[in-house]
Image (tube, coloured by chain):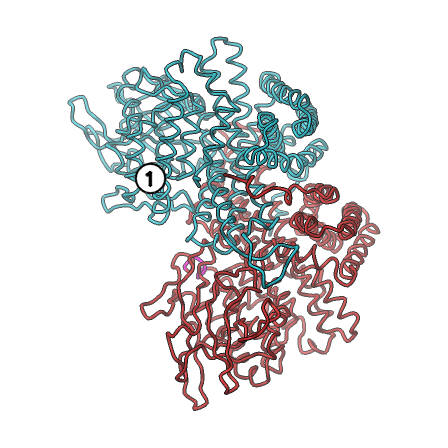
Chain colours: A cyan, B red
């Protein structure tokens, strides 16, 4: 069995639960059939097992380093893994056929990519960034920009980056200081410093295409003044010559995990190069001026689902490793017979070890399922000809995205911690991969919008937008699942009762909070709201899964029911506590004075 | 202000809450006064700040490595930090004066040592092991063994190790295979393999004194057949010659954190050396044969409090770092005014950041307080002339030890994760120390008995021992605090109500569980029981603290009340969920079949 992901589970999620074959009725996906989808999953699984998994350890041990000439060196294994990825064509898996993509359903693309993310989140990061950059260009770039920049990204001839953050402005993009000046030839010259740039520099492809947020000189302050530019590392001039752009690595960030993804601070236009004989990095505006952030936001849901899937995938591979270990590691004796002369048993026989595994299972399978559910919403929206339906799908996706991003980054990290605990001391050593999973996964609560920002987004914006329309759509879907669960009775019936009760309470709470004339007080408790919402969403996703399992009693389906039962009985009730506190408009956090915390 | 620990808080805990000066009335501590105690804390604080804190980073970056001759090299900074520690005499802080110790109250020793543990858990580990080995020898060794081995340990002329685990027997000590053969000259020859030996080899002192669990040939199987031996790395023979013992490092363990503590696998008697012309490592029996584990157990409470304090201390330094960072890092604007033209504020102004800091505060100050409370019980027992009182104190300590060890290792690790989150991306890099704290602290749930073992110890043994006497003693103390809190009213009054309600429920639950004729079923839920018990204990410790704060309203005392309020309102209610589930004899974990978990 694979230790990367469970093929049986991925099959269950895609074909039995999410019924992806129904998507193939839409013209967009009509060229595919079950066989091509399965072939893509086969391909991703082989690539993950044969190339990414082993390179993952090397990429962690041998961190990227700067060469004397300022370029960045990566281990050969990373290069080889990415070359293998490029050869599969998976970089363009869900992109439209008319620009050279495979035009696969997005949910299948995400499931395939999850194999790579589980096998090496750091190496798959390069692919994720390229695909996102290509997506953005296809959506907002000119036909020439698509031709010149998006297609090479999809073909792996270049890799992409997203240059948003700056040293003084991590999460606060309105404070971006990088600026751009028109050069009179239709191009711009860019100046400024960027921070946290993943994939900033390397030799993995012919060039690198940076997408850079900057303010055109004279543009308004705040996020409204931001524009988005293509800044290629290597610029082809009008005369056909290719010159080095003035984009220089100022220094590498040395991370706790995900070390295989080079991450750097960048200087634009500081004079390391003078491309085409003038100062500043050459950049090409995407769309109109002042639309930069809105373009980024169109990609945000997909990028955040990418992070959520990565968190789920890292948790998932940890769970599979720990389960395999627990089946083969012999130690101790059952509580019922402590005779020292008897042979030790596999540690999976100890209920506390099974407890740790079942918790992991409920977290990682729930989290992966939620993210694939969201990915399917993207497909439904893409395929729907009905504008209202499309809008509803997008609203639901907007609502679920902060949950799909943040919940796995908290709970699948806890799963990784439990995987270490199952291994005991061995898990704490670098001889086993579980400690790397734990370090790698810790990033996911931070990047693509910290979980604090996701919480504000959910409670401050998403549940209230369009008069709560998104929340209503969510509630309708949950109630439909509950109705089906109650019809079935048994486990799904009990699960439905529990989920619906929490849904009702959460809806009441949400209405109450938004009726308060104290948004600062409400938002101070946004984080526990997000966590409670996440627990409800995951409990619902488990209900959905056990409905599909109904009437089947082999090990796979019993396992699903056990994980759902754990989640219903031990996890879902946590939401009660948060709902109580929030309902009391608890002001503990907001009223804590900064000077009380420590001297 | 120090970023290691808060001196104000340590002062509060020792002098205002735990009233350590009252201990000085006992003859054992009569030579000390408030000044000498304060001087010891000053000394520890300077040592932590001047030597340990900087060496901590180096020890993490430059991992111990094997030299070609099989010895282990450590960075010079570790050597320098430990030499400075030896010079202070703190290694013998709480040992009796008649064997060369300072004979300080144990609680002051632990508080002083907590500074070193916060500044460098890995480097302080060498000191902890030596002190523990010396303790064990003083308690169970012969006068000659104390002279020859315990005194050099306290003086820092040798360092100590504990050799318990074996590769096939991590937590299952009954399966130890190492064996010992009497050599006819009053010594033994030892053979076998040991694993996870901290401090296994280094050049930090003249020699290393290993305490080794092994089975004398022909002894019974299981833990009853185990004896404890002194196995010096360098053996002084009868003729005065010192020769190398047959103790060889088989390989180093490369850990995720706490890298400054060398950790190795050992071979005893495999022929690397033939000391005194014969095979086997030369060992000296401590006490009688077959008493090995019971000797180890007399040290277990103190060792586990050492781990609990370390976990609390690592969490604590992370909290202080994060608070300082949040006060100086400018980013974003208050929810009330998002004007991009206004200046950014310090991130501590954002309620969500204060939330993350307040949670850390409640965890780390609660955890440190609980561990110091336990350390004071050791002192009370040492000083009491009344056998019944002494027995009661020891019973209470026995009960609280698994909680004091495990709770901080879970929740102060979460505090370390929150510290990273406060730093954002910076916290994930090795440019800031918080990621190291997080890696270092992950060990504490594993060593000195995994938390799973602590849970079985608490629910399976401690709450039931002597017909529940320990639990009664605990309940009496909690009720006394609650009565005092209710008298005061206000915050302490509300806190007392909440704590007493949970206490009642937990006592009922415990009686119910032990009335079941299904110990395997009960123990399958031992981990959530331990967590609930821990939350109750920490909530009680917070009640104790705010009782002392009553009537005082400066920042320090307001901070204590805010942290207690957070814990009462947001954390303590979690116990309800566990108590419900356990009270329903939930069989989710025990009934999950191993084959359901994954293919």
In the rendering, at what x and y percent does residue B551 appear? 76, 52
Drawn side of residue A254 relative to residue A580, left or right: left
Using the image, determine if residue A229 lies above or below residue B235: above
In the rendering, at what x and y percent does residue A469 appear? 60, 17
Marked residue chain, label 1: A
Q: Secondary structure at mark 1?
A: helix
Q: Which residue is mark 1?
A: A51
Which stretch did the figure color magenta?
Answer: B54-58
Q: State yes or no: residue B57 in magenta.
A: yes
Q: Residue at x 59, y 83 (%)?
A: B142
Q: Residue at x 47, y 64 (%)?
A: B51
Drawn side of residue A158 relative to residue B281, left or right: left
Using the image, determine if residue A492 lies above or below residue B451: above
Q: Quadrant of residue B243?
A: bottom left
Q: Which residue ends up furthest to the front in the rendered image?
A: A342
In the rendering, at what x and y percent does residue B525 appear? 67, 47
Using the image, determine if residue A286 lies above or below residue B384: above
Q: Nearer the viewer, residue A454 or A108?
A: A108
Q: Nearer the viewer, residue A311 or B85?
A: A311
């Amino acid at each position: 069995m694979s230790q990367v992901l469970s093929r049986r589970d991925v099959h269950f999620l895609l074909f039995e639960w999410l019924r992806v074959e129904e998507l193939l009725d839409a013209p967009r996906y009509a060229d595919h059939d079950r066989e091509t989808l399965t072939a893509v999953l086969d391909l991703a699984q082989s690539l993950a097992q044969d190339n990414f998994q082993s390179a993952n350890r090397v990429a962690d041990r041998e961190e990227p380093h700067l060469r004397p000439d300022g370029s960045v060196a990566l281990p050969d294994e990373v290069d080889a893994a990415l070359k293998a990825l490029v050869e599969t064509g998976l970089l363009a898996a869900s992109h439209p056929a008319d620009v050279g993509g495979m035009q696969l359903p997005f949910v299948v693309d995400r499931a395939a990519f999850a194999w790579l993310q589980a096998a090496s989140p750091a190496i798959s990061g390069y692919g994720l960034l390229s695909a996102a950059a290509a997506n953005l260009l296809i959506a907002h770039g000119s036909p020439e920009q698509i031709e010149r920049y998006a297609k090479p990204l999809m073909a792996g001839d270049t890799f992409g980056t997203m240059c948003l953050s700056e040293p003084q402005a991590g999460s606060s993009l309105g404070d971006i200081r990088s600026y751009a000046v028109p050069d009179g030839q239709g191009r711009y010259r860019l100046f400024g410093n960027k921070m946290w740039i993943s994939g900033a520099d390397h030799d993995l492809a012919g060039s690198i295409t940076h997408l850079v947020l900057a303010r055109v000189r004279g543009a308004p302050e705040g996020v409204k003044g931001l524009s988005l530019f293509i800044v290629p590392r290597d610029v082809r001039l009008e005369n056909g010559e290719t010159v080095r752009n003035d984009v220089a690595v100022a220094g590498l960030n040395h991370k706790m995990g995900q070390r295989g993804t080079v991450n750097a601070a960048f200087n634009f236009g500081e004079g390391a190069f003078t491309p085409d004989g003038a100062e500043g990095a050459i950049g090409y505006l995407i769309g109109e001026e002042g639309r930069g952030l809105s373009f980024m936001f169109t990609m945000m849901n997909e990028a955040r689902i990418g992070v959520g899937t990565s968190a789920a995938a890292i948790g998932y591979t940890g769970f599979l490793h720990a389960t395999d270990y627990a089946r083969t590691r012999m130690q101790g004796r059952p509580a019922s017979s402590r005779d020292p002369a008897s042979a030790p048993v596999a540690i999976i026989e100890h209920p506390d070890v099974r407890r740790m595994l079942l918790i992991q299972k409920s977290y990682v399978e729930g989290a992966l399922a939620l993210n694939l559910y969201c990915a399917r919403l993207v497909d439904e929206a893409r395929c729907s000809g009905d504008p209202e339906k499309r809008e509803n799908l997008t609203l639901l996706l907007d609502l679920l995205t902060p949950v799909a991003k943040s919940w796995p980054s908290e709970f699948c990290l806890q799963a990784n911690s439990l995987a270490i605990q199952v291994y005991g001391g061995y898990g704490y050593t670098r001889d086993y991969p579980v400690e790397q999973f734990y370090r790698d996964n810790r990033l996911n609560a931070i990047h693509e919008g910290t979980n604090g920002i996701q919480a504000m987004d959910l409670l401050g914006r998403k549940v209230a937008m369009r008069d709560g329309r998104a929340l209503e759509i969510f509630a309708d879907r949950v109630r439909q699942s509950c109705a089906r669960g109650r019809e079935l009775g048994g486990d799904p019936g009990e699960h439905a009762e529990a989920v619906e009760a929490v849904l009702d309470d959460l809806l009441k709470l949400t209405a109450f909070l938004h009726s308060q004339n104290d948004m600062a007080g409400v938002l101070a408790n946004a984080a526990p709201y997000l966590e409670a919402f996440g627990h409800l969403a995951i409990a619902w996703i488990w209900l959905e899964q056990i409905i599909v399992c109904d009437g089947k009693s082999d090990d796979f389906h019993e396992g699903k029911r056990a994980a759902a039962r754990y989640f219903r009985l031990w996890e879902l009730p946590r939401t009660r506590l948060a709902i109580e506190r929030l309902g009391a408009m608890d002001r503990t956090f907001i009223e804590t004075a900064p000077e009380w915390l420590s001297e």
